[in-house]
Image (spheres, rainbow, N blue to C red):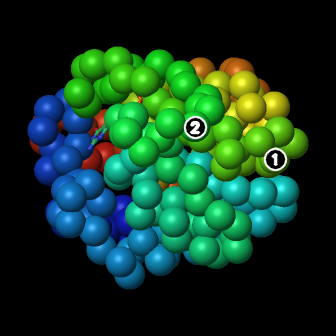
Amino acid sequence: MQALKDKIVREGIVLNENVLKVDSFLNHRVDPELMAGIGKAFAERFVDSSVDLVLTLESSGIAPALMAALELKVPLIFARKQLSLTMKEDLHVEPVYSFTKQVQSQVAVSRKFLSEGQDVLIIDDFLAHGEAAFGMARIVEAAGSRVAGIGIVIEKAFQNGHAKLAEAGYRVESLARVASLADHRVTFAE
Ligand code: 5GP
C-alpha cells in the first residue's frame, strides 16, 4: 500500500535494526485518513474470504482493525491484555510474549463475544516473530472457530513471523513489508 509506505518513509523512526517507531500515525497519535485507507486495503485483500468478525489486540491494533471491520461490515473484538474488574465472565485466555515489552502477558477474550463456528480475521499493527498473531489464532481455535486470515499493517519481513504463520497454514496479508532497518533506513521488500 503506497500511501502507508510513503508515511513510513516520511515519519517512521528506526530505533535500531529490529524496531521501527511509528507513533506519529499508528502507535500513539493516529492518522484517521490513513486508517480509512488501511481498512479498505484489508477489505480488498480479504474480499473472497468469509469473515464474521475481526479480532485484534489492544491497543495499537484497534484503529486499523476497526476500519477493516467497518469495510467488511462485521464486528470488531479487541483482546484485552489486562484483565479488568469488569471482566468477570467466562474468558478464553492465552499467554502472549510481547516483542516490544519483552514480557509475557495473559491475553483474554470473553466467550460471550467469541463463540464457535465463526470465521475470524486477525488484524495487528506489526508482525515480527508472530507471537501476537499465534496467540490470537490459539484463542480463535480454542473457541471452536476458524482463522480466516491474518492482516498485518507493517510486516518486518526480515524476522520470521510470516514464515512461521504460513507454515502453520495461515494466510498472511501485509500492507507494507519492510526488508531491512539497517543503517537507520527503511527498505521495503517489494
Ligand atoms: P510479534 O508478536 O509478531 O513478535 O510482534 C508483533 C507485536 O509486537 C505487535 O503487536 C506490535 O505491537 C509489537 N511490535 C513488534 N515489532 C515492532 C516494531 O518494530 N515497532 C513497534 N512499534 N511495535 C512492534
Q: Residue at x 80, y 48 (%)?
A: 119
Q: From where the camera sits, is residue 136 visible?
A: no
Location of residue 52 in the rendering, given as x and y in whole percent from the top left corner? 77, 57
Of badges 1 and 2, the one in the foreground is 2
Question: Could you say whether the residue bearing mark 1 is in a helix, strand or loop?
Answer: loop
Three-letter amino acid code of the residue under disc 1: Gln
Location of residue 179 in the rendering, given as x and y in whole percent from the top left corner? 38, 39
Location of residue 128 in the rendering, given as x and y in whole percent from the top left corner? 41, 31
Find disc 1 in the rendering and name its residue.
Answer: 118
> 148 and 90: which one is in front?
90
- Locate residue 30: give its quadrant: bottom left
Q: Residue at x 77, y 42 (%)?
A: 115
Q: Residues within 10 Å of mark 2 (few under 14, many from 20)?
A: few
Location of residue 156 in the rendering, given as x and y in whole percent from the top left corner? 39, 37
Question: Could you say whether the residue bearing mark 2 is in a helix, strand or loop?
Answer: loop
- Locate residue 146: give its quadrant: top right
Whether label 1 lies within 8 Å of ligand 1 gets the answer no
The image shows residue 102, relative to residue 10, as above or below, that is: above
Between marks 1 and 2, how big is the CA–CA gap? 20 Å
Three-letter amino acid code of the residue under disc 2: Glu
Q: Residue at x 14, y 32 (%)?
A: 16
The mark that comes first in sequence, 1 or 2, is: 2
Q: Residues within 10 Å of mark 1 (few under 14, many from 20)?
A: some
Quadrant of the rendered image holding ligand 1: top left
Residue 64 disc label: none
> 14 and 88: which one is in front?
88
Find disc 2 in the rendering and name its residue.
Answer: 89
